[in-house]
Image (cartoon, helix red, strand yellow):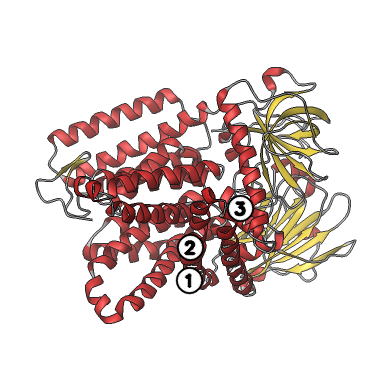
Amino acid sequence: MQGGGASGKSFFGGASALVGIDGRPLLFSFALCGGAAAYFSLSFEPSQAFLWGLAAMTLVVWLAARRWCTSDVAIACAVVCLGLSAGTLAASLRASRVEAPVVEEQSRPAMLEGWVQDIEPGRKGVRLLIRVHSVAGMATDDWPRYVRLTHTSRLEVAPGRFVRCWAMLRPPPGPSMPGEYDFRRQAWFAELGAVGYVQGRCRGGALGAPSDLLGQATLWLGAARRNLGLHVHEAAGERAGGFAAALVSGDRSFMSTEDSEALRDAGLFHIVSISGLHLSIVGGIVFLLIKRCLVFIEPLALRVPVQKPAAIVATLACLAYMIISGAAVETQRSFVMIAVVFGAVIFDRAAISLRTFAIAMMVVVLLQPESVVTPGFQMSFAATGALVAAFEMWRDRRAGRDQILGPIGFGAASVAVTSLVAGLATMPFAVFHFDRAAPIGFAANLVATPIVSFLSAPAAIAAFVLAPFGQADLGLRLFGYSLELLLWVSHFFAQFAAETATPNRAMPTSALIAATLSLAGFMALRGRLRLVAVVALAGVSLALWGTAPRRIAHWSISGDFFYAPDASTILKLNLAHGDGLSPLRFSEASGFNCNKTGCELSAVAGTSIQITSGETPDVCVYARALEPPDAAHCADGTGNPSVHLRWPEVVAAGGRTVYLEGDRLFTIDAPACGKRPWYPCAKNSIHGPSRPAAPD
């Protein structure tokens, strides 16, 4: 980043002595994120009239400050207020714009007709994303736009086909504990109105494509992706064909469960998700090839800066890759960032800078504000911003280090620093969302990144270049060999997954905010102020996390009971017959056994748990060991040395979590229904009676 000087003026105002000329776009982009996050954290739906008024007021304040105020601090405060109000308004408008019918209760088996748009792998079977044409027995206005069905029988349909399925539909499940991944909210923004499963199997129908052009194009693209995935799967080889198909077409249904788990345990699963890494490699290689080729066309090279047409072609290549891979949300987000980078090249701006990073963040937040509260958005932008800031620091000192280390040593050091910076930047978000901090991921990425960059990517590009000559399979086979090596690396490092830390002290939101501010300070500030702010805010985050209540146990509406026997382990018992989702953060929990009458367990921090099995199982959690544990000592309410969990009450609460703070046990239920558009109160829910909405 370059300093702006005293006379420098940007769109957001004068240059700041602390953060430089790029500081105000960064402040605005961070404030946009904060406003969107604030909207999603509210327990009620705010009035759009109020949000419009707030945005108009802050806009007037910002214009006045920019026109008449000379204080950088005052202008920066106006920028932050404007960003907060704009982010909140953008999120509210987006939530109302995507409103679509949502199934309010579990249906009886019904004939559903529609077009298969996508196929995804699942643990219980493949999952079909279907664009609904009709649902028998349901009013037309209540038909969901999209449904996702689990298909366990032999699959005889493909994307693009019209199908008829005998299906059970239910509302998208919500989280069973605060802070857990909110599938229901994401389903709302994806216009997914129901989930369920197929009884028997889906069969093809005679109806053709939808009448609208967008629907026809979407289904044609889905069929093309499936055919491409099939071809790549066969051409890349049996061992890595599924992995290759996932990277080329975005279709993960060919990947084996063992390989997916190994990649996830080794911290390499981000390679499967087509995002910034893939688009950067594709765009970078295409840009370099086109630029080098245009240099040899002398009349063009003497009259036109060759990097500009190369940037245009690279942008189009990334766009084509995004479309053919299915244009998932994370891929769209990454394409926006890549497009902004190449746009900077076209308009003679610094391609890699925090200003470019800030513009990309603004575009993504304004287009998809719901992504702000997702792990993918937070981790990708955290890693990108930290890497850009570290790159600028590294670049300023490159000359001296290059002479000391040499080109090869400097390159190796750059790869190591990249992995370290990205790992540290994303670690707070991984701990907050998944309760996991995997140090082994640093070493795995250190080994895997060169394989992807120097073996897999060139082989994939070679397959694309050879395709017009009918020799694409040669490049795809080389691509498969490189991915076989990558799978070997993932399986090797997955052996050490047991070393992954799983803290039972859940990171509170306040600690995540402090960690995020520390990361923002690393990006925006300069000199000693950067070091002071980063260290101080990181210390505050650790202090808040260290004093947070301990999570002792959780009973999910799925019927699974989880508890922490020590500071780094979570164990699971299927205690009751339920339905719904278990917490994603506990997906790696190991099972334990309990006899038919129940069992007594020793938990973390000197607590103990008594489980009474049966048709209506009960759980008593004691803050201190009672000799012997006796249900008579198990009191209700908060502020007691023990709490009593009854299965019917857990079902009605949508899930219940037990925390320990000092010597006091207390419980927290799942988010209340009825207050936000994506939290409707289900009718006659299979999960039990709905909880009334909490008062404002």
Percent coordinates x, y for residue 675 in the rendering: 58, 32
**Residue placed furthest toward the right:** 596
Label 1 crowd bin: few (<14), some (14–19), many (20+), radius 10 Å: some
Q: CA distance from mark 3 to mark 1?
A: 22 Å
Residue shown at the point (65%, 43%) measured from the top left: 226
Task: Look at the image and tell me whether residue 562 can be seen.
Answer: yes
Q: Quadrant of residue 663?
A: bottom right
The residue identified by callout 2 is 427
- Drawn side of residue 566 relative to residue 31, left or right: right
Which mark's residue is nearer the viewer, 3 or 1? 3
Which amino acid is tagged 3?
Ala
Task: Look at the image and tell me whether residue 516 can be seen.
Answer: no
Asked if residue 88 is positioned above or below residue 301 in the image, the reply reads above
Asked if residue 237 is positioned above or below residue 163 in the image, the reply reads below
Residue shown at the point (79%, 40%) measured from the top left: 156
Of pointers 3 and 1, the one earlier in the residue sequence = 3
Percent coordinates x, y for residue 248 in the rendering: 56, 51
Of pointers 3 and 2, the one earlier in the residue sequence = 3
The residue identified by callout 3 is 246
Label 3 crowd bin: few (<14), some (14–19), many (20+), radius 10 Å: many
Which amino acid is tagged 2?
Met
Q: CA distance from mark 3 to mark 2?
A: 26 Å
As helix, strand or loop, the secondary structure at mark 3 comes to helix
Which mark's residue is nearer the viewer, 3 or 2? 3
* Tag 1 near tag 2, CB within 8 Å: no
The residue identified by callout 1 is 446
